[in-house]
Image: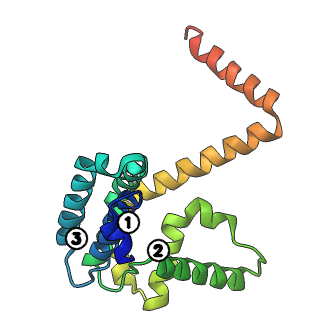
Amino acid sequence: MCDAFRTAGGAFAPVYLAFGWVHQAAHILGRIELTGAAVRRRLSGLLGAMTRHRGVVGELSGAVDHFVKVSRSYWGGLFGCYDTAGLPRANNDLERAVGSHRYHERRATGRKGASPSLVLRGAAKLVAGLATRHREVTAAELAGADRVAWKRLRAELETRRERRTERRRFRRDPEGYLKALENKLIQLRLPA
């Protein structure tokens, strides 16, 4: 930023301060030599300071609140890339990886567009596709998988598939769908 804005202290002072906070957050997240815990601790401190001093930026306090809220919403998955070697850190790297997967899937299936199953089963399909592109996965590695986690993922994917099926049934015939639901409700209320 221009030194005139920094020393002006007038109308641009809040903008300069808010920009400094965002720039500092980008600098913290860009530190590839730190562990996930260290980056988490530093970013948490910055977000706490932004929350405490949000009034200093005047009308931009709403933007600061939004920045903190969005940062906290991504908190759970934000720091894994620092502790996992080879995991892409930037959106560009992630977009390139997903785009590459879509390209290879289109080539393999002969589709012109992305497969609808990528939306439905992306949590499993994308990870499996990216992992097998980096190296061959052996049968022993597959046999040693966590069966409980695998069953939980399968149940989640099946629930997602069922919801999608129900939405499609409703869109095709809303009256019939609601009538079937009403009949099920009546059956549940009848004495056995």
The amino acid marked with disc number 2 is Val
The reply, left or right, for residue 100 in relation to residue 116 is left
Choose mark 2 or mark 3, whichever is in front: 3
Q: Is residue 141 visible?
A: yes
Vertical placement of residue 85 versus 10, above or below: below
Residue closest to the eye, 171 or 81: 81
Identify the residue under disc 1. 19
- The residue sitting at 55% across, 66% down in the picture is 122
Gap in Å between the C-alphas at discs 2 and 3?
Answer: 25 Å
Classify residue 178 by image quadrant. top right
Disc on the earlier residue, 2 or 1: 1
Residue found at the far bottom of this picture: 135
Q: Residues within 10 Å of mark 3 (few under 14, many from 20)?
A: many
Q: Residues within 10 Å of mark 1 (few under 14, many from 20)?
A: some
Classify residue 80 by image quadrant. bottom left
Q: Residues within 10 Å of mark 2 (few under 14, many from 20)?
A: few
The label on residue 127 is: 2
Label 3: which secondary element? helix
Disc on the earlier residue, 2 or 3: 3
Residue 149, image x and y in percent? 35, 60
Residue 42, image x and y in percent? 19, 66
Identify the residue under disc 3. 39
Residue closest to the eye, 55 or 103: 55
The amino acid marked with disc number 3 is Val
Q: Are marks 2 and 1 in contact (CB under 8 Å)?
A: no
Residue closest to the eye, 172 or 158: 172
- The residue sitting at 30% across, 45% down in the picture is 55
